[in-house]
Amino acid sequence: MTGVMRATWADIPHSGGWAAVEEVAKGWSSDKKYRITTKEGQRLLLRISGGEQYQAKKKEYEIIQKFGALGFPMSAPAGFGLCDGGKRVYMLLAWVEGRDLEAVLPGLPESEQYRLGREAGRILRLIHSLPVAAADVPAETKKAKKLAQLARYESSRLRQEGDQAPLRYVRENIDWIWRLPPAYLHGDYHPGNLIYRDDGSIGVIDFNRWEVGDPYEEFYKLESFGIECSVPYCVGQIDAYFDGPAPEDFWRALAVYAAHAAVHSIQWAKKFGPEEVDAMAARYRRAMDSYDGFRRIVPRWYTDKWSRDFHPRTGFAEADRSICFRKDL
């Protein structure tokens, strides 16, 4: 640990017992992140933010404490407060041992990918089951915000071929979102924020984008990021979340979120440079294909291929049957 680190974090409780500090560069957050190894061999995640974020980070820590009480593996709370003479906020969390799920999934059998998706779906349903404090319920829905984001995209120089279809779809179907009672959301739930543990279970990390809102919004990143590494995982997450067939209102709401993200994400990525804009444009084209130019509400990649063979107690009796897309919605 450098002298600067010692001076900056000297007022973090028990920092004198740290044996090693390694910066963690992964993720989109503005927080500085470090993996801490204590002299006893324990590993922790340290997040450092500006002192002006104290109230927001304090609330985030309280929400993480709520999630921690649910009993699933996660980056559980281990400490919070001010450091660097009050100029910065620190948050200590348990380090979830394992490998990034998004890196592991493509190399697993499809049946295992689906099983992990089902585990992720059960955890997500548990998160959404938390009672929401009245003070945390937003005064307004996101409908106006999302329409304003579409308008900004339309006035940009990043317009994509055929984008009138998703723009029209969102505007004509915006009232399908925010129909459910608000729930606590992870806010960024996809394989990049899940850990594949040595025992084959899933650990959840990165709760810094938590919010209270429409539970169905939590699923749009399956289209944005999830299907890039594993379609069976994505199908499994949906299947287990509903513990049966997903209702029509879910598919209609998800299509709105997918259409909105397909175009808005291109504008959003501009601040990260042309490579990220190109990546989001590629995801736009994929979403257009998944939803057939938003003429369908169930994406092409959703299938009952794996659910037909899955048995909760015994696993899979058979695997890798021919794909069969749902056409009933």
Image (cartoon, grey):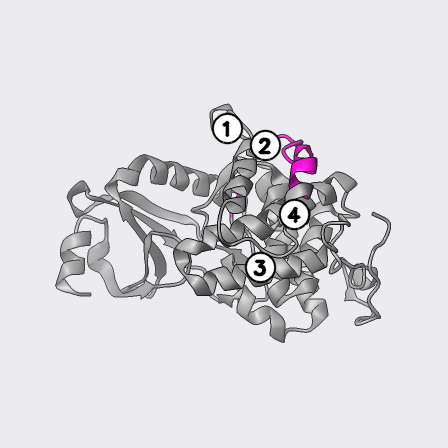
Which residue is drawn at the image coordinates 72% and 53% (left, top)? 293
Q: Residue 187 or 1: which is nearer the viewer?
A: 187
Residue that badge 1 annotates: 138
Q: Amino acid at mark 2?
A: Pro
Distance from disc 2 to disc 4, alpha carbons, whole Å, reads 30 Å
Q: Which callout, 3 or 4, points to the residue nearer the camera?
A: 4
Image location of residue 5, percent across then percent down: 18, 59
Residue that badge 2 annotates: 182
Does any portion of residue 186 appear in the rendered image? no
Distance from disc 3 to disc 2, alpha carbons, whole Å, reads 24 Å
Name which of mark 3 and mark 4 comes first in the sequence.
4
Q: In the structure shown, which secondary structural element does the residue marked by tag 4 occupy? A: helix
Does any portion of residue 324 appear in the rendered image? yes
Q: Is residue 100 above or below residue 329?
A: below
Name which of mark 1 and mark 2 comes first in the sequence.
1
Mark 2 and mark 4 residues within 8 Å of each other at the beta carbon: no
Distance from disc 1 to disc 2, alpha carbons, whole Å, reads 9 Å
Q: Which callout, 1 or 4, points to the residue nearer the camera?
A: 4
Q: Amino acid at mark 4?
A: Gln
Q: In the structure shown, which secondary structural element does the residue marked by tag 1 occupy? A: loop
Q: In the structure shown, which secondary structural element does the residue marked by tag 3 occupy? A: helix
